[in-house]
Every structure is written in structure tokens, then in C-alpha cells.
Image: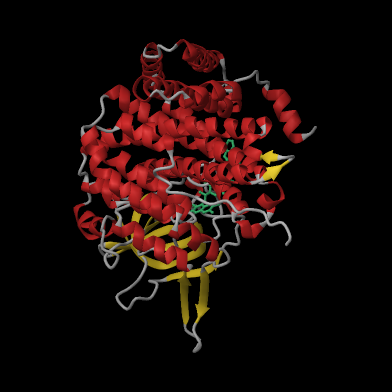
Amino acid sequence: MPFNQPPPSLGNQYTDDRVLRSHLRRALPAQVLAEVESELEALGGQAGGELYRFQLADRLNEPVHTMWDAWGQRIDRIEVSPLWQRAERIASEQGLVATAYESRHGRYSRIHQFALVHLFTPATDVYSCPLAMTDGAARALVASGNKALIARAVPHLTSRDPAQFWTSGQWMTESTGGSDVGLSETVAKKDGDRWRLHGRKWFTSAATSQMALTLARPEGNAAGGKGLALFYVETRNAAGSLDRILVHRLKDKLGTRKVPTAELTLDGTPAWAVAGDSEGVRNIAPMLNVTRTWNSVSAVSYMRRGLALARDYARKRVAFGAPLAHKPLHADTLAGLQAEYEAGFQLAFLAVELLGRDESDGLDDASRELLRLVTPVAKLTTGRQSVQVLSEIVESFGGAGYVEDTGIPALLRDAQVFSIWEGTTNVLALDALRALQSGKALSALQVEVETLASAVRDTRLLDPAKAAQAALLHAQQWLGAAKGADVEAGARRFALTLGRGYALMLLCRQAQWCLDHEKDERPLFAAQRFAGNGVDLVGVEDVAAAARLANDD
Ligand SMILES: Cc1cc2nc3c(=O)[nH]c(=O)nc-3n(C[C@H](O)[C@H](O)[C@H](O)COP(=O)(O)OP(=O)(O)OC[C@H]3O[C@@H](n4cnc5c(N)ncnc54)[C@H](O)[C@@H]3O)c2cc1C
């Protein structure tokens, strides 16, 4: 018999995830945890069992766009893969969006919801994409105070009944710009008490959604972001056909192959203004804050999935006389990745916790400033981490990691999107600088970090805590000293230092708690290791040299 390589297998993705479980034990009151744990266990079982098998079997299925019917009618029908059809049902029934709005556990409801998201995302080949936008649309509509639209759409967006459940698109990017949306060319023309939109949207994921929030410029408005308004669109008319929307094609993408990302033309599409006829970029911000938080948790959840598979494989795969897990160098490699996961998890779930507190009890000024800063910083930090970690995960499988039908390459290809959509690393780094403009966010961060540092008692945690504080201080000093173009050029290294420094400090807090309450040293080892991976990326910049190097002249 030839030798066969042992495939990796997954256990219950909730009970096996020490990091998630111990975080919930610290962050949730015991009563709340007792109420939500059976749901998490059930979803964790599905994620590592039925859904994992489904993912492997569904690997080659992709969304199909049928432009014309047999009789020459333009239909633009999009059918998603069987896995995604199943994912939609699970998502509505298990309240992946609803949990946040039912608010059964007040400020803890977002933690409950995102624990579900953490289990769900890597098990459904990024069905989290339409869900993130659905959650974001519900949030933006609620924030707008538009009673008619809230009454019409929010009950659908937050429904647990698959027959009633709607997803929402977020149509911002045009070929003129995704980051620079102020360049948008879609025009809104008044038509009685509603509007009609004319233009082309260049990246529209969740192209099967029942509604979308989108940006367009009312005729006569000024150029730039302020002149755009936020519009609500229902994609289908009473007959069930797309309502003056043409789907040109689905994008042929590196990853997220199950996500139907379409190029659309809005050809007089009926639309309703969500909040006045300008300031659309400001009015869509609540949506982006939510989708960016989904992105942070999804990026972290991909790291966890990769590690779960790689760890299992390392126990089974024998090389040079022993399982890989027993080889010190292989173990060291996985330890470095685990540390990235643990730190990223803490940062992403801090954003979640602040969001939940903001929506329930409200935040004081300092914490609101912190939330404003942490949202882009967590997104950009975890987005970069996930690409690096998943690249190493592929390598940890050797040649098998490069072979499509193991399912491993898709993890890396999917992870690459987390640093692009919802704002690229650079664009979010500049956003983080904007968040600091009032000066209050940085002092809020400083107070937070000092409080966290003073709670660290175990002597083995003192060095990692000091490394975090030193990196954050260096970032602050750099910002104080940098001028003009230097600030912009260094923004990414600055923001990543904030993200990694803060993540390390939060990991120290978790490690101390685990030592005190669970006699578990592993988060301590993760903190030490993450500090060694490097947190201070500020460096010394030279704008002129960077420009010459970039342009090679
Ligand atoms: C799979 C997928 C699905 C998507 N789905 C949607 C969707 O549903 N809805 C939607 O609206 N959009 C969607 N997008 C679009 C996505 O949000 C944009 O691609 C992204 O925001 C970047 O915009 P862009 O493509 O115009 O890149 P650009 O803005 O042209 O950026 C190109 C490069 O320039 C950098 N850059 C840009 N501005 C600056 C600056 N000022 N300083 C320094 N560097 C800068 C960027 O970081 C990037 O590296 C999707 C994208 C992908 C890949």
C-alpha cells in the first residue's frame, strides 16, 4: 500500500478554542456566559463538523450569473453556491445579525454576537461579507433616525426567520475610486418624493441582496464627499425583477470566490434619501464602523482556522522520525503564529466590547474617542496579520498547503481581502490620524494603557508590558515631532505600532487574568512571544528617500 498523507481534521471550534473561551470567561458575567454557551457550542460543532465537510465538498462551486433567459429577456439572475445557501439559513436562524439588535444581554450583546461571527466566518467561506453589510445597514438606518426606512427595512435585516431575512449591499466603490469615494460619478435625480440613480458601481458584493445603501450625488451638488448623499435602494420591484439595475458581470477574483461581487449599472434605479441630500460619507460612517469590526473579527477567525488545521496536521505528519509537532523548530513557527492570533483577538474584541457599550449604556467622551481610534486600527492591524499568518500556515503544510483540494490555499486567498476591502491598510492609517486630530483619543489610549500596565503583576509579564508601553510612547513621540509630508509617509508604521502595541498590552491583561483565575500560562507565553515578534514599527522615515526608492529614480 502506498503511504497516504493524513488529512487535518477539526474538532468543535468553540470547545477547542482556548482563546475565545477564556476571553468570554473574563469579559462576560458568569450568568450571561451560561446563557449563551450552548449556542456557541452548537455552532462550534457545526463549524468543525458538518460545515467543514460541506466546505470541502462545495469547493469548486461558485456563484453563477445568468444574464439572459432562453427567450431573450435580460434577467441577471445570480445563484450562490449550496454552501452559501445553507449559510444564509444558519445566519438568520442563529441570529448572526439579530443578536446585536435583540440586545438580550445589553452591553454584552455585541460580544455574544461576535463570538458567533468568529465561529461562523471561516466555516462559510466568508458569508460574513453580506452579513457585515446587513448589520452595518441596520446600524446606519437606526443612526439616521429615518423612521419610515427603519420601519421598512430593519425588521428584515434583523430577522431570525429565513423567509423574512434580508441582506444588504454597500455600494460605494466606483471605477473612479474606492478609497477616494468623493470622486463618485453616480448622479441622483429627483423624481417626486423619491430619487432615481444613474451611474456605475464597480465592486458590489452581496449582489443577491434585497436592498443596499449607496452613495450618489444629487444633481447640482458640489463635487467631493460632502456633495454625496446616502440612498436606500430596494433591488427588486414588485414583480421580483431587478429594478433598473443591470449586472454586467461577476468579478473573477483572487479569493472570496463564493462572494458574488458584481459590476452594476444603476439605470434610473428608484432610491430614497436616508438622511438629507448631502453629507452621505458622514451618514454612511456608522455602517463602516460596523463592517470594519466584522472585518477585524473575521481576520482573526481565519488565523484561528488556519492554526486549528495546522496544529492537527503537525500532530499527524511524521518527518525525520517524529510528528512535526515534536520538532522544536516547527513548534516554534506555530507558536509565533499563535501569538499573533492571541494578540489580534484581544484587539478585535476590544473594538467589539466598545461598540457594544456604545450602543447600550453609551460611552463617555474618552471611551468614544477610543472607539473611533480603535475601529480602524484594529481593522488594519488584524488585516495585515491574517495575510502573514495564513501565508505561514500554507507553508506549514509543505506541498499539501499549495494544493487546492486540501482546501488550504483558499484560506490565504480569502485572507488577502481583509486588508483591502472596508479600507486598505494605508487608507485606514490615514483615518487613524484623523481620529487623533482632537488630541483626546491619544490621551484616552494613554490612560487605558497605564491602567492596564498597572494591573500586570506577574514578573514574567513586566517585560512584554514595558515593550508595549515603549512602542506606544515611541509612536506618540514620533507623531509629536513629525511634520508635513513625514506624518503622511509614516502613518502606516505609526498606526501598526499603535495596533500591535495596544494588542500586546491587552494580551498582558488577559495573561494576568488567566494566571490568576485559570492557572494557565499559555497567554503569558503568547505575550512574551508577540513582544518578540515586534511591536514597534515606527522606524525612521525619510520621505525624500522613500519617494526615490518607490519610483526607483
Ligand atoms: C472582493 C472585494 C469585494 C468588494 N466589495 C465591495 C462592496 O461590496 N462595496 C464596495 O463599495 N466596495 C467593495 N470593494 C471595493 C473595496 O472597498 C475597494 O477596492 C477598496 O476600498 C480600495 O479602493 P480602490 O480599489 O479604489 O483602490 P485605490 O483607492 O485605488 O487604492 C490603491 C492603492 O493605493 C493606496 N492608497 C489609496 N489612497 C492612498 C493615500 N491617500 N495614501 C496612501 N496610499 C493610498 C491604497 O492603500 C492601495 O494600496 C470590494 C473589493 C474587493 C477586493
Q: Is residue 146 above or below residue 435?
A: below
Residue 540 image offset from top left, x and y in percent: 65, 18
Measuring 52% from the left and 44% from the top, which residue is drawn there?
A: 308
Look at the image and tell me whether residue 171 can be seen: no
Measuring 26% from the left and 65% from the top, which residue is drawn there?
A: 164
Residue 404 image offset from top left, x and y in percent: 65, 58
When asked about the image quadrant of residue 493, the answer is top right
> With 312 as the anchor, is 438 left or right in this view?
left
| Quadrant that contains the N terminus | bottom right
Residue 159 image offset from top left, x and y in percent: 25, 58
Task: Kindly give the residue lying farthest to the right in the view shown.
Answer: 553
Q: Is residue 48 above or below residue 80?
A: above
Q: How is the image coloured?
A: secondary structure
Measuring 59% from the left and 42% from the top, which residue is drawn there?
A: 315
In this figure, what is the number of numbered marks?
Answer: 0
| Quadrant that contains the C terminus | top right
When asked about the image quadrant of residue 360, the answer is top left
> With 25 as the anchor, is 6 left or right in this view?
right
> With 459 as the anchor, is 32 left or right in this view?
left
Task: Kindly give the residue lying farthest to the front in the view shown.
Answer: 1
Could you say which is closer to the camera, residue 551 or residue 182? 551
> With 157 as the anchor, is 77 left or right in this view?
right
Could you say which is closer to the camera, residue 218 or residue 197? 197
Residue 339 image offset from top left, x and y in percent: 53, 30
